[in-house]
Image (cartoon, rainbow, N blue to C red):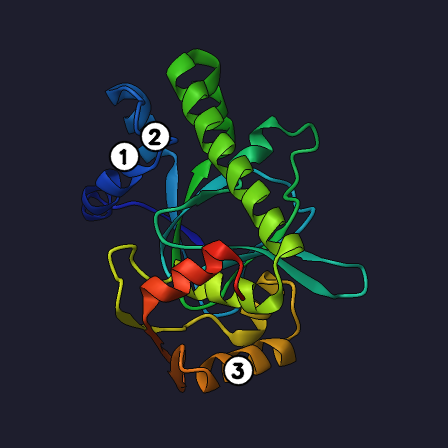
């Protein structure tokens, strides 16, 4: 794995995507150009590690394409998936406010992925100079905190079926009300870890939902039926 400097063609494609990220959206032209100069592209193969837990943290990241999992690894080697990063999402920015400046989790590409890495010390320098940039980071971390509170509620107060259905519905655009078909590219054992259930429980839940007519699964293709009803039942706690 190596980091490569962005070419002029890379910059033309990366700049609009980086601008869409809340961390960089409100930077002035000089600040943003500096971020681009301190950005590198990282190409990851499937199952390749981007950074390891407790490794010195010198970069923040934005996923360009693919999927990356963030996981805690116990001394015995057991893994708990904390988050699944999708394209357009930044991660590891909280390390700029940590005294230890080490990554608290391990980041691994689930599929072949491309990541933009940004020099953390350079961006921290912008934060010292720009109130707007500081508020952008605070807004991003506030959103993450609200999401984590919702996740805690989901994982502690809802049963396995509800967690699985919620996960599947998260893969569907909110405008889809009748049916939707999508590829489940994330390995099932990773999904199970993310939902704090065993792979066997995930398989049994898929089978149960299939028998009850809520979905069909063929290989990695999932087709959900009557999405509006599924959403209503999740909200009412019927599952």
Tell me if residue 145 comes above or below residue 195 in the rendering: above
Q: Earlier in the sequence, mark 2 or mark 3?
A: 2
CB under 8 Å between callouts 1 and 2?
yes
Mark linked to residue 19: 1
* Pointer 3 local density, CA inside 10 Å: few below 14, some 14–19, many at least 20: some
Residue at 58 percent of width and 74 percent of height: 189
Q: Which residue is mark 2?
A: 24
Q: Position of residue 35 (x, y in %)?
A: 35, 31
Q: Nearer the viewer, residue 194 or 125?
A: 194
Report, in whole angstroms, how far the alpha carbon at label 3 lies from the one at label 1: 44 Å
Q: Earlier in the sequence, mark 1 or mark 2?
A: 1
Q: Position of residue 152 (x, y in %)?
A: 62, 48
Secondary structure, mark 3, is helix
Q: Position of residue 154 (x, y in %)?
A: 58, 53
Q: Nearer the viewer, residue 24 or 212?
A: 212
Report, in whole angstroms, how far the alpha carbon at label 1 lies from the one at label 2: 5 Å
Mark linked to residue 208: 3
């Amino acid at each position: 794995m190596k980091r490569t400097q962005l070419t002029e063609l890379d910059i033309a494609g990366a700049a609009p995507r980086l601008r869409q990220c809340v961390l960089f959206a409100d930077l002035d032209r000089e600040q943003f150009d500096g971020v681009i100069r301190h950005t590198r592209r990282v190409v990851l193969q499937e199952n390749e590690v981007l950074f390891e837990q407790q490794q010195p943290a010198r970069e923040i990241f934005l996923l360009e394409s693919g999927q990356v999992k963030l996981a805690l690894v116990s001394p015995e080697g057991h893994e708990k998936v904390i988050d699944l990063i999708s394209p357009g999402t930044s991660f590891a920015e909280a390390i700029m406010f940590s005294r230890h400046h080490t990554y608290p989790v391990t980041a691994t590409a689930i599929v072949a992925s491309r990541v933009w890495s940004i020099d953390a010390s350079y961006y921290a320098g912008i934060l010292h100079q720009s109130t707007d940039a500081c508020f952008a980071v605070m807004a991003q971390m506030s959103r993450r905190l609200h999401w984590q509170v919702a996740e805690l509620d989901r994982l502690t107060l809802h049963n396995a079926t509800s967690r699985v259905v919620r996960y599947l519905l998260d893969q569907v655009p909110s405008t889809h009300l009748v049916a939707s078909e999508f590829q489940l590219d994330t390995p099932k054992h990773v999904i199970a870890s993310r939902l704090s259930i065993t792979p066997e429980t995930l398989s049994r839940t898929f089978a149960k939902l299939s028998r009850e007519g809520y979905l069909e699964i063929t290989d990695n293709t999932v087709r959900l039926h009557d999405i509006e009803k599924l959403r209503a039942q999740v909200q009412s706690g019927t599952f």
